[in-house]
Amino acid sequence: MKKKPKYIFLDRDGVINVDAGNGYVDNWKKFRFLPGSLKALRLLRENGYKVVVVSNQAGVAKGFYSLKDLHEMTQRIKRAVEGHGGKLSAVYYCPHRREDHCSCRKPRTSLFRQAKKRFGMRFRETILVGDSMVDVAAGKALRCKTILVLSGREKLSRRSAWKVKPDGVQKNLLEAVRWILQRGHRSKP
C-alpha cells in the first residue's frame, strides 16, 4: 500500500535563501542558498515530504522586478534544488504590497488554501517553516505545526514580543528538518 505524502510549507527568503534584508532578491545573481538548505530539501524528498513554497514577493508590485523575472528565477531555483536531490512540488507567490490588502499576502491564507485544493493535504498534518512571525501567524491560522528558523528576519532576542508562538524554533532549515525527522515524521523506515 502506497503511503500518502507528507507536506511541508516553506517560506523562501530567509529559509531557503539569504534574505536581502531591506533590499530584494530580484535576480538570480543575488540569489544565494543558505548553508544547508539544499541538503535539507534533499532530506525532505528522501523522507517522503512534498515541499510547497509560499512567499510574499512585494518587489513585483513595487516595480523592482516583474512576474516574468520572478518566474524565471523560480525555474532556476527548482533546477538547482533538483540538481542536489531535492524537489519543490509547488511554489506560490503573493506579488502584492501590504497596502493592497489582498487575500494572498501572508499572514492571510489563500495561497495555502490553493495548495490544499491542489494536493488534498490536511493542514493539521502539515508543517510550516518560516523566518518571520508573519509565517508563524499564517501557520497558526491554518492549524499547521509551525517552526521558526533564525536564519532570516526574526531574532530570538525579540521572543517576549511575539504575539504568536511557534511550535519550535531552530537555527536554520537544515536543523528544522533534522528536528522534524528525529521526532518520527519519516515516511521511510
Image: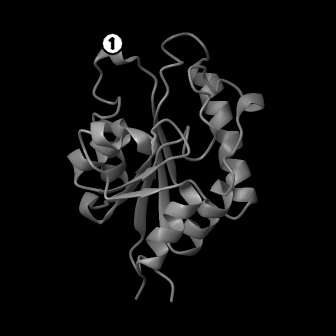
Task: Indicate whether 96 appears above or below 54.
Answer: above
Name the quadrant containing residue 126.
bottom left
Residue 170 to residue 18: above or below: below
Determine crowd level at label 1: few under 14, some 14-19, many 20+ residues with C-alpha closer than 10 A: few
- Front residue of this view, candidates 121 and 146: 146
Q: Amino acid at mark 1?
A: Glu
Relative image position of residue 89 (x, y in whole percent) = 52, 55
Q: Looking at the picture, how far across and down is residue 134, in whole percent? A: 34, 36
**Residue lying at 75% horizontally and 58% vertically, measured from the top left:** 83
Q: Element type at marker 1?
A: helix
Q: Where's residue 97, x and y in %?
A: 40, 17
The residue indicated by pointer 1 is 99
Q: Is 176 placed left or right of 127 in the picture?
A: right
Front in this rendered view, residue 96 or 143: 143
The colouring scheme, among rainbow, by chain, secondary structure or one colour, is: one colour
Residue 62 visible in image: yes
Residue at 63% across, 55% down: 37
Q: Quadrant of the N terminus?
A: bottom left
Question: Could you tell me how many numbered marks the image carries?
Answer: 1
Residue 119 percent location from the top left of the image: 37, 57
Q: Residue at x 59, y 47 (%)?
A: 16
Residue 186 visible? The answer is no
Q: Is residue 174 left or right of residue 1?
A: right
Q: Residue at x 48, y 75 (%)?
A: 181
